[in-house]
Amino acid sequence: MLRDDVPLPMGQVALRDGAGVASPAAVLVSALGELYDPEPDPAPGPFAVRTVTCVVDPPFFGNGDIGRLAVCAAVKALAVAGAEPRRLTLAAVVEAGLPAALLHRAAASVREAVREAGVRVAAVDARVVRAGEVDRLAMVATGFGAFRRPELDAAALRPGDRILVSAPLGSHAVHVLSLRAGLGFEYHVPSDVAPLGGLVEAVRAALPSGALRAAGTVTEGGLASVLREFAGRSGYGVRVDEAALPVPYGAREAFDVLGLDPLYAAGAGCVCLVVAPAEETAALAALRGLRHGRLATAVGSVVGGPAGVVQVRSPEGLSTPLPADGGECPVRLL
């Protein structure tokens, strides 16, 4: 929510400050309140830095917006590297003429996502550009985190390791694409956008040292992109079971209408984890005890070969390799 002393203005964002509406940077800082903390982070030791750029059409959707997407994406990028998210910097590019109410909506969304992620914002910047030079609002978030444990690296994968996903696939892609096309699925399939900063650490804490091999964020390119990265980095093969892929009924129906494969669907609230085979049950129990991991499931395994290849096994037992590239949704969703 916005602070009580920040009135919701009428009007639009102007190219120059002083035109009746506060500057976008001032709106963001004011909405953040006590979550805006420009003081240096006192955390000692090695740190991680990750930057994400969010351009989504539309930038405002049913249960989220580009502000929440940017914060959550930066936090997840740190988490899957094995770092504890600590601080963010935010930059916004705003189209002149954007209704002020939408700017305030994005600012309030940023505040809520920052609070939910348990981080602070150290710096904010914004620029207003002429109408038509950006799709209403674009955001860049840079996250800073501390490594409390060794960095996660897919080079640690071994044959037999189990592949888990923390949530069903495709909700964000279905929500945004349906909203764009006016198909109506967006009313039944909300975006899954969430920060997930504590999810990876919760699994790591529940397992013996080294049992969580690697983690990746299911974003643009979908689960297929994460699995390709794992296979290429490890030098082993990856096999997923098509029947095990968790896709909600409403989303599956939408994929049929849209002609998309859930493996390639962009996500905003799902991570892929690889764990030692003996720790699959414990990892799933840790995930399912969390709000954003209650529908976690195993979807496949690391295999000896072919090296660097991702295979999809059909319900009939036929394994088909994924192409080296392609299949991604052509629309920016994150």
Image (cartoon, rainbow, N blue to C red):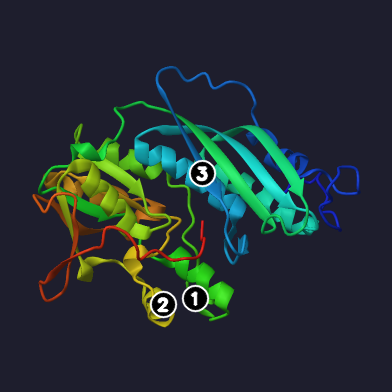
Q: Secondary structure at mark 1?
A: loop
- In this rendered view, identify the residue nearer to me: 115 or 194: 194
Q: Residue furthest right?
A: 19
- Is residue 64 found left or right of 47 in the rendered image? right
Residue under the point 52% across and 60% down: 332
For label 1, the residue is 188
Residue under the point 35% across and 54% down: 293
- Residue 62 against residue 280 in the figure, above or below: below
Crowdedness near tag 2: few (<14), some (14–19) or many (≥20) residues, C-alpha within 10 Å: some
Amino acid type at circle 1 is His
Amino acid type at circle 3 is Val
Residue under the point 51% across and 44% down: 52
Q: Nearer the viewer, mark 3 or mark 1?
A: 3
- The number of numbered discs placed on residues in the rendered structure image is 3
Q: Nearer the viewer, mark 2 or mark 3?
A: 3
Measured as percent of width and height from the top left, residue 178 is found at 52, 75
For label 3, the residue is 52
Ranked by sequence position, the earlier of labels 3 and 1 is: 3
The reply to whether the C-beta atoms of the residues labelled 2 and 1 are less than 8 Å apart is: yes
Amino acid type at circle 2 is Gly
- Is residue 287 found left or right of 106 in the rendered image? left
The quadrant in which residue 215 appears is top left
For label 2, the residue is 250
Measured as percent of width and height from the top left, residue 200 is found at 34, 42
In space, the residues marked 2 and 3 are separated at their CA atoms by: 29 Å
- Residue 15 against residue 318 in the figure, above or below: above
Q: Secondary structure at mark 2?
A: helix
Ranked by sequence position, the earlier of labels 2 and 1 is: 1
